[in-house]
Amino acid sequence: MGQLVTFDKILYKYVLYSLSMNQEDGEDIINQENTYYIIHENTFSLNNSISISNKIKHVPSYHQYFCPIVSSTSLDKHFHKCHSNTNKNNSGNVSANVNVNSVQYILIHYESTFQEFPLLSDIYTSSILNPAFDYISIYFNLLESIELLNKYNIVCFCISHSSLIFDTSNNSTMICDFTNSFYIPSLQYDRLSMFFHEGVIHDNESHDNDYASACFDVYFISYLLFHNIDEITEKILENCVNEFCATRPILKREEIYKWTECLNGYTTPLVIQYLLQFASSWSIYSFNYYYYLLNYTTDNEHFFQSHISTQIEDYLHCHPKKRILDFHNVLQIVS
Protein backbone atom coordinates (compact mmCIF):
# COMPACT_ATOMS: atom_id res chain seq x y z
CA MET A 1 0.00 0.00 0.00
CA GLY A 2 1.21 3.48 -0.78
CA GLN A 3 1.99 6.08 1.85
CA LEU A 4 1.31 9.80 2.04
CA VAL A 5 3.44 12.11 4.17
CA THR A 6 1.53 15.29 5.10
CA PHE A 7 1.96 18.34 7.27
CA ASP A 8 -1.58 18.39 8.69
CA LYS A 9 -5.03 16.86 8.29
CA ILE A 10 -6.44 19.87 6.43
CA LEU A 11 -3.77 19.61 3.79
CA TYR A 12 -4.30 15.84 3.60
CA LYS A 13 -8.03 16.31 2.94
CA TYR A 14 -7.31 18.89 0.28
CA VAL A 15 -4.91 16.51 -1.47
CA LEU A 16 -7.62 13.88 -1.64
CA TYR A 17 -10.06 16.47 -2.93
CA SER A 18 -7.61 17.70 -5.60
CA LEU A 19 -6.92 14.20 -6.82
CA SER A 20 -10.61 13.30 -6.95
CA MET A 21 -11.23 16.23 -9.34
CA ASN A 22 -9.35 14.33 -12.04
CA GLN A 23 -9.64 10.79 -10.74
CA GLU A 24 -12.47 8.68 -9.40
CA ASP A 25 -11.38 8.72 -5.80
CA GLY A 26 -8.46 10.38 -4.07
CA GLU A 27 -8.13 7.72 -1.36
CA ASP A 28 -7.80 4.98 -3.96
CA ILE A 29 -5.00 6.86 -5.68
CA ILE A 30 -3.09 7.39 -2.45
CA ASN A 31 -3.43 3.74 -1.52
CA GLN A 32 -2.26 2.25 -4.81
CA GLU A 33 0.26 -0.51 -4.62
CA ASN A 34 3.89 0.44 -5.31
CA THR A 35 3.29 4.15 -4.73
CA TYR A 36 4.69 6.64 -2.28
CA TYR A 37 3.52 10.25 -2.04
CA ILE A 38 5.18 13.23 -0.43
CA ILE A 39 3.76 16.71 -0.10
CA HIS A 40 6.45 19.29 -0.68
CA GLU A 41 6.47 23.07 -0.75
CA ASN A 42 6.60 24.41 -4.29
CA THR A 43 10.19 25.63 -4.73
CA PHE A 44 12.69 26.08 -7.55
CA SER A 45 14.73 23.13 -6.22
CA LEU A 46 11.73 20.83 -6.30
CA ASN A 47 10.69 21.85 -9.81
CA ASN A 48 14.26 21.40 -10.94
CA SER A 49 14.27 17.89 -9.43
CA ILE A 50 11.04 17.11 -11.28
CA SER A 51 12.57 18.34 -14.55
CA ILE A 52 15.72 16.23 -14.08
CA SER A 53 13.60 13.20 -13.13
CA ASN A 54 11.68 13.52 -16.39
CA LYS A 55 14.96 13.40 -18.32
CA ILE A 56 16.21 10.42 -16.33
CA LYS A 57 13.08 8.44 -17.18
CA HIS A 58 14.26 8.46 -20.81
CA VAL A 59 17.44 6.62 -19.84
CA PRO A 60 17.18 2.92 -20.82
CA SER A 61 16.83 0.65 -17.77
CA TYR A 62 16.96 3.67 -15.46
CA HIS A 63 15.30 1.62 -12.68
CA GLN A 64 18.61 -0.17 -12.14
CA TYR A 65 20.43 3.04 -11.30
CA PHE A 66 17.95 5.72 -10.26
CA CYS A 67 14.76 6.31 -8.33
CA PRO A 68 13.41 9.55 -9.83
CA ILE A 69 10.13 11.33 -9.19
CA VAL A 70 7.50 9.45 -11.21
CA SER A 71 4.95 12.25 -11.42
CA SER A 72 3.79 15.38 -9.66
CA THR A 73 0.52 17.21 -9.08
CA SER A 74 0.33 20.92 -8.28
CA LEU A 75 -2.16 21.79 -5.57
CA ASP A 76 -3.85 24.97 -6.74
CA LYS A 77 -4.91 26.17 -3.32
CA HIS A 78 -2.43 28.26 -1.32
CA PHE A 79 -1.95 27.59 2.38
CA HIS A 80 -0.78 29.99 5.05
CA LYS A 81 2.52 29.08 6.64
CA CYS A 82 3.63 30.80 9.83
CA HIS A 83 7.23 31.57 10.73
CA SER A 84 8.09 32.99 14.14
CA ASN A 85 11.31 34.28 15.65
CA THR A 86 12.27 35.97 18.90
CA ASN A 87 14.52 38.97 19.44
CA LYS A 88 16.12 40.31 22.61
CA ASN A 89 16.80 44.06 22.83
CA ASN A 90 19.52 45.81 24.84
CA SER A 91 17.26 45.95 27.89
CA GLY A 92 16.86 42.20 27.90
CA ASN A 93 13.22 42.28 26.79
CA VAL A 94 12.16 39.55 24.39
CA SER A 95 9.79 40.21 21.51
CA ALA A 96 8.26 37.74 19.10
CA ASN A 97 7.62 38.30 15.41
CA VAL A 98 5.26 36.14 13.40
CA ASN A 99 5.37 36.17 9.60
CA VAL A 100 2.64 34.56 7.54
CA ASN A 101 3.42 33.52 3.97
CA SER A 102 1.17 32.11 1.30
CA VAL A 103 2.59 28.73 0.28
CA GLN A 104 1.73 26.40 -2.56
CA TYR A 105 2.42 22.68 -2.39
CA ILE A 106 3.13 19.93 -4.91
CA LEU A 107 2.22 16.29 -4.46
CA ILE A 108 5.23 14.15 -5.43
CA HIS A 109 4.84 10.54 -6.52
CA TYR A 110 7.69 8.06 -6.11
CA GLU A 111 7.75 4.35 -6.67
CA SER A 112 7.64 2.25 -3.52
CA THR A 113 11.41 1.66 -3.64
CA PHE A 114 11.88 5.18 -2.30
CA GLN A 115 10.13 4.11 0.90
CA GLU A 116 11.09 0.45 1.12
CA PHE A 117 14.84 0.66 0.61
CA PRO A 118 17.06 2.08 3.36
CA LEU A 119 19.65 4.80 2.88
CA LEU A 120 23.07 3.55 1.88
CA SER A 121 24.61 5.34 4.88
CA ASP A 122 22.39 3.34 7.27
CA ILE A 123 23.29 0.03 5.63
CA TYR A 124 26.92 1.05 5.54
CA THR A 125 27.06 1.84 9.24
CA SER A 126 25.38 -1.41 10.23
CA SER A 127 27.72 -3.45 8.00
CA ILE A 128 30.97 -1.62 8.62
CA LEU A 129 32.48 -4.37 10.76
CA ASN A 130 31.57 -7.10 8.30
CA PRO A 131 34.51 -7.90 5.97
CA ALA A 132 32.09 -9.64 3.63
CA PHE A 133 30.33 -6.36 2.87
CA ASP A 134 31.45 -5.52 -0.65
CA TYR A 135 32.46 -1.85 -0.40
CA ILE A 136 34.33 -1.96 -3.70
CA SER A 137 31.42 -3.36 -5.73
CA ILE A 138 29.15 -0.67 -4.31
CA TYR A 139 31.69 1.94 -5.37
CA PHE A 140 31.80 0.72 -8.97
CA ASN A 141 28.02 0.31 -9.07
CA LEU A 142 27.64 3.97 -8.14
CA LEU A 143 30.38 5.04 -10.50
CA GLU A 144 28.46 3.41 -13.35
CA SER A 145 25.35 5.39 -12.35
CA ILE A 146 27.31 8.65 -12.29
CA GLU A 147 28.86 7.99 -15.67
CA LEU A 148 25.38 7.32 -17.05
CA LEU A 149 24.26 10.74 -15.79
CA ASN A 150 27.23 12.31 -17.56
CA LYS A 151 26.32 10.55 -20.78
CA TYR A 152 22.93 12.29 -20.69
CA ASN A 153 24.43 15.70 -19.73
CA ILE A 154 22.99 15.62 -16.22
CA VAL A 155 25.18 16.95 -13.42
CA CYS A 156 24.42 15.97 -9.84
CA PHE A 157 26.86 18.36 -8.19
CA CYS A 158 26.05 17.54 -4.58
CA ILE A 159 25.51 13.99 -3.35
CA SER A 160 24.60 13.59 0.32
CA HIS A 161 23.35 10.84 2.65
CA SER A 162 19.75 11.41 1.45
CA SER A 163 20.76 10.94 -2.20
CA LEU A 164 21.47 7.21 -2.12
CA ILE A 165 19.26 4.26 -1.29
CA PHE A 166 20.33 0.63 -1.08
CA ASP A 167 18.45 -2.08 -2.95
CA THR A 168 18.61 -5.01 -0.53
CA SER A 169 17.29 -7.44 -3.15
CA ASN A 170 20.42 -7.28 -5.30
CA ASN A 171 22.88 -5.30 -3.13
CA SER A 172 22.99 -2.32 -5.48
CA THR A 173 22.72 1.40 -4.81
CA MET A 174 20.43 3.89 -6.55
CA ILE A 175 20.48 7.68 -6.72
CA CYS A 176 17.14 9.07 -5.57
CA ASP A 177 17.63 12.81 -4.99
CA PHE A 178 18.20 15.23 -7.87
CA THR A 179 17.59 18.50 -6.05
CA ASN A 180 21.14 19.73 -6.58
CA SER A 181 21.35 18.81 -10.25
CA PHE A 182 21.13 20.51 -13.60
CA TYR A 183 20.97 19.72 -17.30
CA ILE A 184 24.12 21.15 -18.94
CA PRO A 185 22.53 22.33 -22.26
CA SER A 186 19.91 24.39 -20.40
CA LEU A 187 22.32 26.08 -17.98
CA GLN A 188 22.25 29.85 -18.54
CA TYR A 189 24.67 32.38 -17.09
CA ASP A 190 21.96 34.80 -15.93
CA ARG A 191 20.26 32.00 -13.95
CA LEU A 192 23.35 30.55 -12.27
CA SER A 193 22.39 32.01 -8.88
CA MET A 194 19.43 29.61 -8.79
CA PHE A 195 21.93 26.75 -8.45
CA PHE A 196 24.97 28.51 -7.00
CA HIS A 197 23.36 30.36 -4.11
CA GLU A 198 24.20 31.61 -0.63
CA GLY A 199 23.17 28.30 0.94
CA VAL A 200 26.21 26.62 -0.63
CA ILE A 201 28.63 28.94 1.18
CA HIS A 202 26.67 29.62 4.35
CA ASP A 203 26.06 25.93 4.93
CA ASN A 204 29.83 25.60 4.99
CA GLU A 205 29.81 27.16 8.47
CA SER A 206 28.26 23.98 9.86
CA HIS A 207 29.99 20.64 10.25
CA ASP A 208 26.66 19.07 9.31
CA ASN A 209 27.14 20.41 5.80
CA ASP A 210 24.58 19.47 3.15
CA TYR A 211 26.87 20.79 0.42
CA ALA A 212 30.09 19.22 1.74
CA SER A 213 30.52 16.95 -1.27
CA ALA A 214 30.33 19.77 -3.81
CA CYS A 215 33.72 20.59 -5.33
CA PHE A 216 35.56 23.89 -4.94
CA ASP A 217 34.35 24.99 -8.40
CA VAL A 218 30.74 25.01 -7.14
CA TYR A 219 31.65 26.71 -3.86
CA PHE A 220 33.74 29.39 -5.58
CA ILE A 221 31.10 30.24 -8.21
CA SER A 222 28.52 30.55 -5.41
CA TYR A 223 30.87 32.78 -3.42
CA LEU A 224 31.59 35.10 -6.37
CA LEU A 225 27.92 35.48 -7.30
CA PHE A 226 26.67 36.02 -3.75
CA HIS A 227 29.30 38.66 -2.92
CA ASN A 228 29.10 40.35 -6.34
CA ILE A 229 32.86 40.15 -6.80
CA ASP A 230 34.19 41.72 -10.00
CA GLU A 231 37.78 40.47 -10.06
CA ILE A 232 39.66 37.64 -8.38
CA THR A 233 42.50 38.53 -6.04
CA GLU A 234 45.01 36.42 -4.18
CA LYS A 235 43.32 37.35 -0.89
CA ILE A 236 39.92 36.21 -2.16
CA LEU A 237 41.36 32.88 -3.29
CA GLU A 238 43.16 32.32 -0.01
CA ASN A 239 40.06 33.10 2.06
CA CYS A 240 37.83 30.88 -0.08
CA VAL A 241 40.18 27.91 0.03
CA ASN A 242 40.54 28.24 3.82
CA GLU A 243 36.78 28.49 4.34
CA PHE A 244 36.10 25.65 1.90
CA CYS A 245 38.51 23.28 3.64
CA ALA A 246 37.51 24.31 7.18
CA THR A 247 34.68 21.76 7.38
CA ARG A 248 36.17 19.23 4.98
CA PRO A 249 38.72 17.28 7.04
CA ILE A 250 39.85 15.02 4.22
CA LEU A 251 41.00 17.90 1.99
CA LYS A 252 44.42 19.56 2.06
CA ARG A 253 44.38 23.36 1.76
CA GLU A 254 47.76 23.61 0.07
CA GLU A 255 46.74 21.17 -2.68
CA ILE A 256 43.51 23.02 -3.47
CA TYR A 257 45.21 26.40 -3.37
CA LYS A 258 47.93 25.17 -5.70
CA TRP A 259 45.60 24.76 -8.69
CA THR A 260 43.35 27.74 -7.89
CA GLU A 261 46.26 30.20 -8.24
CA CYS A 262 45.69 30.20 -12.00
CA LEU A 263 42.39 32.08 -11.40
CA ASN A 264 44.10 35.09 -9.81
CA GLY A 265 43.68 38.41 -11.64
CA TYR A 266 40.79 37.38 -13.90
CA THR A 267 37.28 38.84 -13.88
CA THR A 268 34.40 36.89 -12.36
CA PRO A 269 32.60 36.18 -15.70
CA LEU A 270 35.80 34.73 -17.19
CA VAL A 271 36.51 32.59 -14.12
CA ILE A 272 32.95 31.25 -14.02
CA GLN A 273 33.05 30.53 -17.75
CA TYR A 274 36.35 28.71 -17.25
CA LEU A 275 35.08 26.59 -14.34
CA LEU A 276 31.84 25.69 -16.13
CA GLN A 277 33.95 23.87 -18.72
CA PHE A 278 34.52 21.21 -16.08
CA ALA A 279 30.88 20.84 -14.96
CA SER A 280 30.68 17.29 -16.28
CA SER A 281 33.28 16.29 -13.66
CA TRP A 282 31.31 17.66 -10.70
CA SER A 283 29.09 14.58 -10.30
CA ILE A 284 32.09 12.25 -10.16
CA TYR A 285 33.89 14.55 -7.74
CA SER A 286 30.85 14.79 -5.45
CA PHE A 287 30.30 11.04 -5.48
CA ASN A 288 33.96 10.34 -4.72
CA TYR A 289 34.06 12.86 -1.90
CA TYR A 290 30.89 11.48 -0.32
CA TYR A 291 32.00 7.85 -0.60
CA TYR A 292 35.45 8.62 0.78
CA LEU A 293 33.93 10.63 3.63
CA LEU A 294 31.48 7.81 4.41
CA ASN A 295 34.42 5.46 4.91
CA TYR A 296 36.42 8.12 6.72
CA THR A 297 33.72 8.87 9.31
CA THR A 298 33.02 5.18 9.92
CA ASP A 299 36.74 4.37 10.15
CA ASN A 300 36.41 1.59 7.60
CA GLU A 301 39.80 -0.11 7.58
CA HIS A 302 38.69 -2.52 4.84
CA PHE A 303 38.19 0.35 2.43
CA PHE A 304 41.40 2.14 3.32
CA GLN A 305 43.40 -1.03 2.82
CA SER A 306 42.31 -0.96 -0.82
CA HIS A 307 44.16 0.92 -3.55
CA ILE A 308 41.04 2.93 -4.37
CA SER A 309 41.15 5.14 -1.28
CA THR A 310 44.55 6.65 -2.11
CA GLN A 311 43.65 7.26 -5.72
CA ILE A 312 40.36 8.91 -4.79
CA GLU A 313 42.21 11.21 -2.41
CA ASP A 314 44.54 12.23 -5.25
CA TYR A 315 41.56 12.84 -7.51
CA LEU A 316 39.86 15.14 -5.00
CA HIS A 317 42.87 17.46 -5.10
CA CYS A 318 43.74 17.45 -8.79
CA HIS A 319 43.28 20.32 -11.26
CA PRO A 320 39.89 20.39 -13.05
CA LYS A 321 41.67 19.83 -16.36
CA LYS A 322 42.87 16.49 -15.07
CA ARG A 323 39.57 15.82 -13.31
CA ILE A 324 37.63 16.24 -16.55
CA LEU A 325 39.44 13.33 -18.16
CA ASP A 326 37.97 9.87 -18.34
CA PHE A 327 37.65 8.90 -14.68
CA HIS A 328 39.01 5.41 -15.12
CA ASN A 329 42.12 6.78 -16.80
CA VAL A 330 42.64 9.42 -14.14
CA LEU A 331 42.52 6.94 -11.28
CA GLN A 332 43.94 4.00 -13.23
CA ILE A 333 41.51 1.70 -11.49
CA VAL A 334 41.07 -1.85 -12.59
CA SER A 335 37.80 -3.20 -11.31
Image: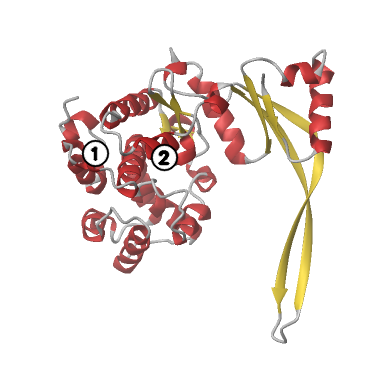
Check the image and report above or below for 140 versus 91: above
- As shown in the figure, which amino acid type bears the numbered disc 2? Phe
The answer to which of 305 and 74 lies nearer the viewer is 305
Q: Position of residue 233 (x, y in %)?
A: 32, 65
- Labels 2 & 1 near each other (Cβ < 8 A): no
Q: Residues within 10 Å of mark 1 (few under 14, many from 20)?
A: some
x%, y% of residue 61? 43, 13
Please give the name of the residue rendered at 40% of the width and 48% of the height, measured from the top-left corner.
Answer: 218
Give the image quarter of residue 234: bottom left
Disc 2 from disc 1: Cα separation:
24 Å
Residue 115, compared with residue 244, is above or below; it is above
**Residue name at image x 58 percent, y 29 percent:** 50
Disc 2 element: loop
Identify the residue position indicated by label 1 in the image. 303
Q: Secondary structure at mark 1?
A: helix
In the foreground, 127 or 73 = 127
Instruction: Name the amino acid type tagged 1.
Output: Phe
The quarter holding residue 93 reads: bottom right
* Residue 303 in view, yes or no: yes
Query: Residue 6: which quarter of the image?
Result: top right
Label 2 or label 1, whichever comes before in sequence order? 2
Tell me where residue 308 appears, x and y as whole percent.
20, 36
How packed mark 2 is, by other alpha carbons closer than 10 Å (few <14, some 14-19, many 20 or more), is: many
Residue placed at 23% from the left, 38% from the top? 302
In this rendered view, identify the residue nearer to me: 106 or 4.
Answer: 4
User: Which colouring convention does the figure follow?
Assistant: secondary structure
Please give the residue where the numbered disc 2 appears in the rendered image: 157
Query: How many labels sit on residues?
Result: 2
Residue 328: mark in rendering: none
